[in-house]
Image: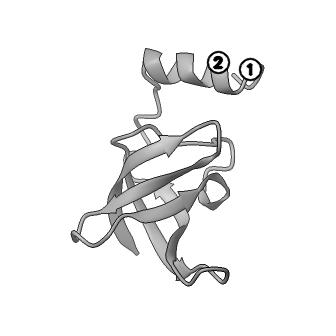
Amino acid sequence: MLTGTIKDWNTARGFGFIKPDEGSKDIFVHCCALVDRSRDYLPIGTAVQFDVQADERNGKLRAIKVAQLDAGSTRRSPRDEAEQIFTHPGRL
């Protein structure tokens, strides 16, 4: 398992990028790779652990089995709440 931080997330499209702690290239992550299936995104700056695998279509690495490291702090910021309301009405 690797560790890293959510660098960017596009809630409208359901994907983002993880910046690995070891300093390698950013890794693509799709919302279906999140271990906590009750969530469809992770806020920017969230510490995560994950595995990687090659995408069959393009050969690039993607994150799988993505889990939040500090799961005790699942409180969202007001900005995250507002973004979710506008991008996913009715899901909160």
Name the amino acid, label 1.
Answer: Pro
Q: Quick one: label 1, few (<14), some, or many (20+) residues within 10 Å?
A: few
**Crowding near the residue tagged with mark 2, few <14, some 14–19, many ≥20 C-alpha atoms within 10 Å:** few
Residue 18 percent location from the top left of the image: 40, 58
Q: In the image, what residue occupies the spot 63% across and 52% down?
A: 31
- Find numbered disc 1 in the image and state the secondary structure of the residue it sits on: loop
Determine contact: label 1, label 2, CB under 8 Å: yes
Where residue 4 appears, as percent x and y from the top left, is 32, 60
Mark count: 2
Q: From the viewer's perspective, is residue 90 above or below residue 48?
A: above
Up-down relation of residue 52 to residue 73 (above or below): below
Q: Eyeballing the image, is 76 above or below 21?
A: above
Where is residue 35? Give x, y as percent.
60, 57
Q: Name the residue under label 2.
A: 85
Name the residue located 74 percent from the left edge and 20 percent from the top edge. 89
Colouring of the image = one colour
Q: Is residue 8 left or right of residue 10?
A: left
**In front of the other: 77 or 26:** 26
Q: Which residue is drawn at 33% across and 65% down?
A: 3
Q: How far apart are marks 1 and 2 (CA)?
A: 5 Å
Front residue of 67 and 15: 15
The answer to which quarter of the image holds residue 34 is bottom right
| Residue 30 horizontal/vertical position (percent) | 60, 57
Quarter of the image where the N terminus is located: bottom left
Disc 2 residue type (three-letter): Ile
What residue do we see at 42% from left, 39% from top?
A: 72
Kindly identify which residue carries mark 1.
89
